Structures are given as C-alpha cells and as structure tokens.
Amino acid sequence: MKSRKIEVIKCKKCESENVVKAGFLEGNQRFKCKNCGCQFQPNRSKGKPENIKRLAILLYMCGLSMRTIAKITKTDLHAVYRWIRAFAEKNYEKPTPKSSEVVVELDEMWHYIKDKKTNVGFGRLIAAIPETEYLSV
C-alpha cells in the first residue's frame, strides 16, 4: 500500500488549520478560514513571471514608453512602473550633489502672475511677417 501524504492547509491571515473548501475560482480550489473568514487559494501564483519583468525593463532601457510596454506584456501600467523603479533602486545609486548649493530654474511665467496685461499666452503675442514681394499691394 502506498502511504498518502496529507497536506495541511493553513489560513494565510491567521495561520489556523480550521479551514473548509469554498468552491473553485478559475479552476483552483478555494478555501475559507472558519476563524477569521478569510478566503484564499493556497496554490495561486501571484504576479508575473520574472522573465516578463526583465523583458519590460529591457524594453524600457531601449526607449519604449511604459504604456507600450504594458500593452506588449499585457500588464498594468503601474506594475511596469513598479518593476522599473525597483530595478533602478536595486542597481543604481542616486548621485550626490557636489556642493550644498541648490540651483532653481524659474520660468518666465512668474513675471505675469501679479499683473498680467494680456489675455492670451504667457506674454505678448508676437508674429514675425517676412517682407517679400508676395506682400506687395
């Protein structure tokens, strides 16, 4: 006779062994904990495979946008962003500034915040009209 190994299923939240079967979800057996009421699937894999994540990072390094990568890998845009960010934090060091000075770039917009005299654009509307024989009257 072959001995059968009984697999003990534990709740993912409270680690209790007091669980019952609660149907199927996408072909996998689902369980429900009698103590805390948590429903879970013990053999469900979460996330995308590592090779998909590496492909996404490689495509990003080649210049593709994150939205395009999300379409190619059939994943969420935010997941692609998290993969790239995690890769960058793990493999690259943030450069430290050479001095304690802070450089701030200001736009021309600050001139017009207090008293803007025009209704359109960032300032005066300037149009250059070339003087050619086409404009002679």
Image (tube, rainbow, N blue to C red):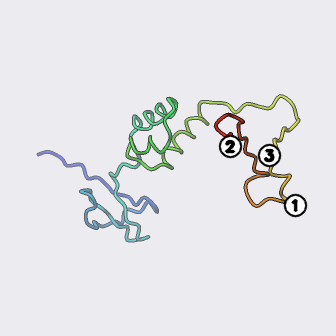
What number is the disc on residue 115? 1
Task: Please name the residue shown 68% across and 39% down the image.
Answer: 136
Q: Is residue 47 above or below residue 63?
A: below
Viewport quadrant of the C terminus: top right
Task: Please name the residue shown 55% across and 35% down the image.
Answer: 87
Q: Quadrant of residue 27?
A: bottom left
Of mark 3 and mark 1, the one earlier in the sequence is 3
Secondary structure beneath disc 3?
loop
Q: Quadrant of residue 113?
A: bottom right
Of mark 3 and mark 2, the one earlier in the sequence is 3
Residue 83: x, y in percent?
51, 41
The residues bearing labels 2 and 1 have C-alpha atoms spaced at a distance of: 40 Å
Q: Are marks 2 and 1 in contact (CB under 8 Å)?
A: no
Q: Are marks 3 and 1 in contact (CB under 8 Å)?
A: no
What number is the disc on residue 137? 2
- The one nearer the camera, 133 or 120, is 133
Amino acid at dot 2: Val
The residues bearing labels 3 and 2 have C-alpha atoms spaced at a distance of: 41 Å
In the displayed image of the protein, which residue is found farthest to the front? 137
The residues bearing labels 3 and 1 have C-alpha atoms spaced at a distance of: 16 Å
Secondary structure beneath disc 1?
loop
Amino acid at dot 1: Asp
- The one nearer the camera, 109 or 13, is 109
What number is the disc on residue 107? 3
Amino acid at dot 3: Asp
Task: Please name the residue shown 47% across and 45% down the image.
Answer: 67
Q: Is residue 68 left or right of residue 30?
A: right
Q: Is residue 47 above or below residue 88?
A: below
